[in-house]
Image (cartoon, rainbow, N blue to C red):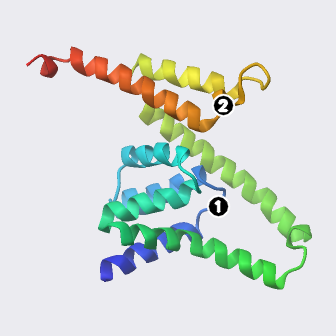
């Protein structure tokens, strides 16, 4: 029971200090779950993020479920998700109950302007860390450049589904399967 409470408490903390959505959670995950508790590695986070991109729901919730499940099974995954969303739900409910036109308050507008800057910095930090861990060879760089080009290609020139994150992730997965299957069959271990 103690381990379940620890998972719930940990993800309450992660949920409390995460602003800005899916990618902004990575610095908090790195500090709390990778460095402080050693529950997961950055490679595992990347794998979970990849799967979360094509699953319904919020990335942070999906990531919480994966990590909780890895630690102690399905119930721990459920508790991790509850812990992650509870601070945000509580805050939104309180705001909705007690403050009319919350977003129109000058202090709130100013605070959100500052928060957006901090979130952008956290996302940039995340992108830099992701890029360092992703490019293992020239093939991965080529896949990255192709997916990036397809994702920013102006609308109207390509069918909408081609720019869809689900399609791009599936296409990249298929490409990775082909590239690394071929690479494995060429390796000395595969010839033995």
* Residue drawn at the location 72% of the way across and 23% of the way down: 153
Q: CA distance from mark 1 to mark 2?
A: 29 Å
* Residue drawn at the location 72% of the way across and 79% of the way down: 93
Above/below status of 22 relative to 127: below
Q: Helix, strand, or loop for circle 1?
A: loop
Q: Earlier in the sequence, mark 1 or mark 2?
A: 1
Q: Read off the residue under disc 1.
A: 19
* Residue drawn at the location 38% of the way across and 71% of the way down: 76
x then y, percent, for residue 70: 33, 60
x then y, percent, for residue 29: 47, 58
Q: Residues within 10 Å of mark 1 (few under 14, many from 20)?
A: some
Q: Quick one: which residue is furthest to the left in this view?
A: 192
* Residue drawn at the location 42% of the way across and 49% of the way down: 45
Q: Is residue 158 visible?
A: yes
Q: Nearer the viewer, residue 157 or 27?
A: 157
Q: Helix, strand, or loop for circle 2?
A: helix
């Amino acid at each position: 029971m103690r381990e379940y409470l620890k998972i719930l408490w940990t993800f309450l903390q992660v949920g409390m200090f995460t602003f800005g959505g899916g990618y902004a959670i990575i610095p908090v995950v790195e500090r709390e779950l990778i460095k402080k508790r050693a529950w997961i590695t950055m490679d595992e986070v990347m794998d979970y993020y990849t799967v979360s991109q094509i699953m319904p729901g919020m990335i942070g919730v999906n990531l919480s479920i994966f990590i909780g499940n890895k630690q102690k099974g399905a119930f721990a995954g459920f508790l991790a998700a509850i812990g992650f969303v509870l601070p945000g739900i509580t805050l939104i409910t309180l705001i909705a109950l007690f403050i009319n036109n919350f977003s129109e308050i000058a202090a709130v507008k100013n605070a959100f302007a500052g928060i957006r800057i901090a979130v952008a910095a956290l996302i940039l930090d995340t992108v830099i860390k992701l890029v360092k861990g992703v490019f293992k060879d020239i093939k991965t760089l080529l896949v990255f450049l192709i997916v990036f080009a397809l994702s920013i290609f102006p609308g109207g020139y390509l069918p909408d589904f081609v720019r869809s994150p689900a399609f791009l992730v599936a296409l990249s997965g298929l490409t990775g399967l082909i590239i690394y299957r071929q690479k494995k069959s060429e390796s000395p271990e595969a010839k033995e």
